[in-house]
Image (cartoon, rainbow, N blue to C red):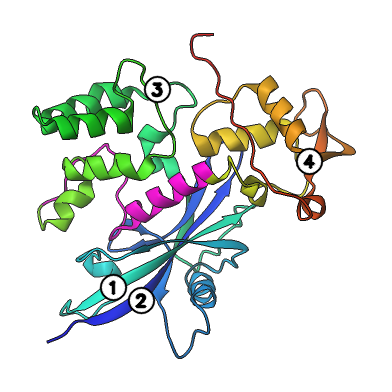
Amino acid sequence: MSAQLVIGLSAVIVAADPEQPCVLVTRRDGDESALPFGPFDPLGHRTFELGLRGWVCEQTGFDLGYVEQLYTFGDRGRETPGARLADAANTSRVISVGYLALTPDQAEIDTSFDARWRSWYSFFPWEDHRRGRPEMIDSEIAPRLTSWAAGNIGRLDRARVAFGLGEDNLWVEERVLERYELLYEAGLVPECARDAGLEAGEEGFGQSMASDHRRILATAMGRLRGKVKYRPVVFELMPDRFTLSSLQKVMESLLGRMLHTQNFRRALDKADLVEGTGAMETSTGGRPAELYRFKREFVRRKELSGLSTPAVRRDA
């Protein structure tokens, strides 16, 4: 019997404020979080994107704005039963086309929909370095990965590069998927045991998600962390008017690390992406700060660039 091919559509919908980048999730497979997703209907959906927009609205009540195609996911056995698009006998192969969607507002979700906003750091707690290197990397992750590698040089090198375990502790924020894949291979995330048909796996290594949705989310995080540096997509997450301080904090929340304020402001001036509105923000109770806007009309006529992300020196 030949397997039937099913095409699924998955959405990573990101909203960010100065405190947390959040992702919109639905409830699938018991208490597990899942990304909005559904099958592509070749007769009813004119395009993949229109099909995706329809599924997201149907499952969450949310109307998508900025959307870009992310990646195609097609590993065998990637679906959990409660999130399965294939037939009950599991003879179909599901290929998911993932999309990244950005919105400037964590719109309130109607209670009739089983959906909610969650910080993406609840799924990847080791990725947030804004208050310094998370203790769990050196106290829990590094020893477990070292034990798993058991002298295997290839595995040890991958762990050192992914988690910055060398002498310089070099951390590359875009390697989100690489880090998750290592933890999965080492059996340190719940999805590993679940996919093997065993009892629930390790706790404390981030909240699990249905099917391979945490892998899809990791891919989206890495893509977005890289893209904000060479394309001005961060402004898709900002309101029409914003302070430079709030823009920097949103960048920091996405990257999971602090930025050097003076260098960030200089790079922003050089990029010529924003302009002052003359209006002031006074609602914070502190010193009034000018409100700025993204020069959307102007940058459409020039070569676009992202924002420089000068890191704070930890030894300063």
The residue to which callout 4 is attached is 274
Horizontal and vertical percent position of residue 107? 61, 57
Give yes or no for contact between labels 2 and 3 (Cβ–Cβ under 8 Å): no
The residue to which callout 3 is attached is 133
Helix, strand or loop under label 1? strand
- Residue 123 visible within the image: no
Q: Is residue 119 left or right of residue 104?
A: left
Give yes or no for contact between labels 4 and 2 (Cβ–Cβ under 8 Å): no
Q: Earlier in the sequence, mark 1 or mark 2?
A: 2
Horizontal and vertical percent position of residue 146? 16, 27
Q: Earlier in the sequence, mark 3 or mark 4?
A: 3
Numbered tag placed on residue 7 in the rendering: 2
Q: Gap in Å between the C-alphas at discs 1 and 3?
A: 38 Å
Give yes or no for contact between labels 1 and 2 (Cβ–Cβ under 8 Å): yes
Q: Is residue 158 left or right of residue 50?
A: left
- Residue at figure coordinates x 15%, y 80% from the top left: 89
67 or 84, which lies in front? 67
Helix, strand or loop under label 4? strand
Specify few, some or many for label 4: CA neighbours under 10 Å numbering under 14, 14-19, or 20 or more.
some
Amino acid tagged 2:
Ile
Give yes or no for contact between labels 1 and 3 (Cβ–Cβ under 8 Å): no
Numbered tag placed on residue 94 in the rendering: 1
